[in-house]
Image (cartoon, rainbow, N blue to C red):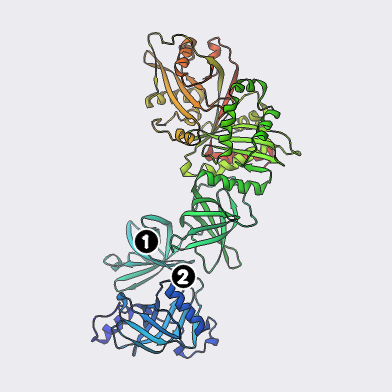
Amino acid sequence: MGRSSFNRTSEERNAAILTAHGKPFTPFWLPEQGLAPDKVDYVRTMGRKALVNVLNYLHFSDRSLLIHMQEAGYPNGYLLAADPEPCLDGEIMCRWPESSVLNDPAAFIRNLVIDDGKSMIIVPLEQPTSDINALKARLPETSYVLSRRQAKRYPCSGVSVALQLKGRRFEGELRDFSPSGFRVRFETGSTFRQPCVNAGDVVDTELKRDDKVLLSGNCSVRRIQEHAGTCEIVLQPSSSAVPVFSKRTVRNPRVRLKPSPTISFEHPLLQMHLQMEVVDICSSGFSVCEDGNECLLFPGMLIPDLAVQYAGSIIMHCSTQVVYRNKDGQGNVNCGIAILDTEIVGYTRLNQLVESALDPCAQVSGEIEPNALWEFFFSTGFIYPKKYHSMQSAKQEFKDNCRKLYQNNSEIAHHFVYQKSGRIFGHLSILRAYERTWIIHHHAGRALERRKSGLMVLRQVMHYFNDFYRLSSQEIDYAMCFFRPENRFPSLIFGGFERQLKNRQICSMDLFSYLPLAKFALATEFDDGWDLEECTRSHQNIFEQFHAKHSGGGLLLNAMSVAGTDKSESRIEALYARNGLVRRTKLYALKHEEQLVALFVVDHSSRGVNFSELLNCIKVIILGERELPWKVLHKAVSQLSNGYNVKKVPVMCYPSTYLETQGVVSNKTYQLWVFRLSFVDAFIKYMQERFRFS
């Protein structure tokens, strides 16, 4: 920032003092003013030894300091940047950067200034000499530290700022920030020659680094300071809280852990690695405490990669956003950080950490001794004689597939267990059944000291879902479960909620009849006029209209990825394949004389993924019960039964009355309960009121 001419008028020289030399400097206290430092409460002294250490740290960190320059006859000075060399014996040498060359012999070197954001060190230089390359001087025995700023200011570089006001856009660069706001520099040009931005205006503000948004929100303009060619604006965030998700009636409980977890991340504005201690934590986020004068976090600030650590191990990596900042009355600030997205394995570990703190008997996808699990299923009657009879021929396959689901950190399955001293008292698991739907199944429990273990694991699952569905990468919308209408417990819980809610767009039930159907041994060709083909998008639209009219709406087709879904892309098959398992769904339409008669949802999965094989069966949705002869349906099932390594293929029919109209006796019926997870807090509230658990 050196000058290019020495001979100027007084007006030119005065303007140069404010602009061309460097940063203007009007100090609020200087040693030469004659006021003793012990009379000024914000000034303290620093010895030469401590100062040398500060200077060497600046050199080590490749940071500049400032030289206070002043011209004779002018009280105001200016600052020039300089790069310190290593300091050993009380002498300092600073080199002028190319952009800040000293070439004015009339300038007088007064002080060396070191600004760390919160305090300023003033160093009166002894016998300074300089040329166009460097400055040399002796360091005094005493320097002065000014700590008048209430909050530390942090310099920044490489962060672009865009302001939007009244349809106009201004782009600048972030210079520094403090807990009270941001200082932004703009090249004024023609835009800032007009009074287009004024103190008090509220502007839409966006901070970016390398085209990645770091902060977005409203800020108020606190101060505007113009110099020739530039304009600096100080912005203050307009709110102490930035909502990230919609407000819920029920939030998951927070816990305080000992030892406390820690978070570590690279500050997006400073590009400096930070580590902070967590005050409390839950499955949706956590809070930290900062010194009110040295805050680094702002509401709205995005942290792309944050690691949560506990007891020396990394629990999860996640993307987060600061959502609030509250003062506690003791000079500290509590900041809340919300989890925006993470991998499912990390989210599950976090749930395990929180749930076990709430109740030591609760486990989320923890290690289970296989024999203890099978003993539990048999002793509780979950695997009853008829069910075991259907399983026993493939028992080793059931064991192997169950091990894959329970002993791997899986993307497709998680289990919730209530156990004590190694013995299981409650169990429930969830499984990714369709592209956007998880199934709740294998629910069983037995008494433990007056505690209802079945309810305990159900509570764990709802806590899990309460934040899980908000993770954008998981693409999850629905939970579903099958249960027999005569089973009192699920009918009371799931059925009771559906009946109380009375809103089929949030929660719906549909009754299916169930029948294991033997394959035709002989020809299975259709009579003339009948045709079975892969389902198209237009077919799906017709089935949606039928189901909406027949059942008053509902989520059945949405949950099974029939409604509004392009089946050409399926990631669920790849997820199962990575875990050594099979899961796929195909849709077929049965037509008679070009009129749609039935939809077939052909589900394939590895044996034992669901013990009742409800994800390894054919589901039939029938548009006209009397238009579809039983013999035709049987032939269609036989054509679709390739790939089922069983003698009888389980078939589920909707409406459930179809088999009765055809004179066919059904073995059993199943309710299919489907729930939209964005309303999971309503289900938790129902459980709290109905069964008195938190």
Q: Which numbered circle lies on residue 161? A: 1
User: Number of labelled discs?
Assistant: 2
**Residue 640 visible:** yes
Q: Is residue 300 left or right of residue 614?
A: left
**Does the residue at mark 1 contact the one at mark 2 (Cβ under 8 Å)?**
no
**Above/below status of 456 relative to 236:** above
Give me the C-alpha separation between circle 1 and circle 2: 18 Å
Q: In which quadrant of the rendered view does residue 363 lie?
A: top right
The residue carrying pointer 1 sits among few (fewer than 14), some (14 to 19) or many (20 or more) residues within 10 Å by Cα, namely many
Q: Which numbered circle lies on residue 153? A: 2
Estimate the x, y position of residue 341 in percent, counting from the top left: 48, 47
| Amino acid type, mark 2 | Arg
Q: In which quadrant of the rendered view does residue 458 lie?
A: top right
Give the residue drawn at x 34%, y 82%: 134
Q: Work out whether residue 660 or residue 198 is closer to the camera in this orientation and state it.
A: 660
Q: Is residue 456 left or right of residue 189?
A: right
**Residue 657 visible:** no
Q: Which numbered circle lies on residue 115? A: none
| Amino acid type, mark 1 | Val
Estimate the x, y position of residue 183 in percent, counting from the top left: 41, 67
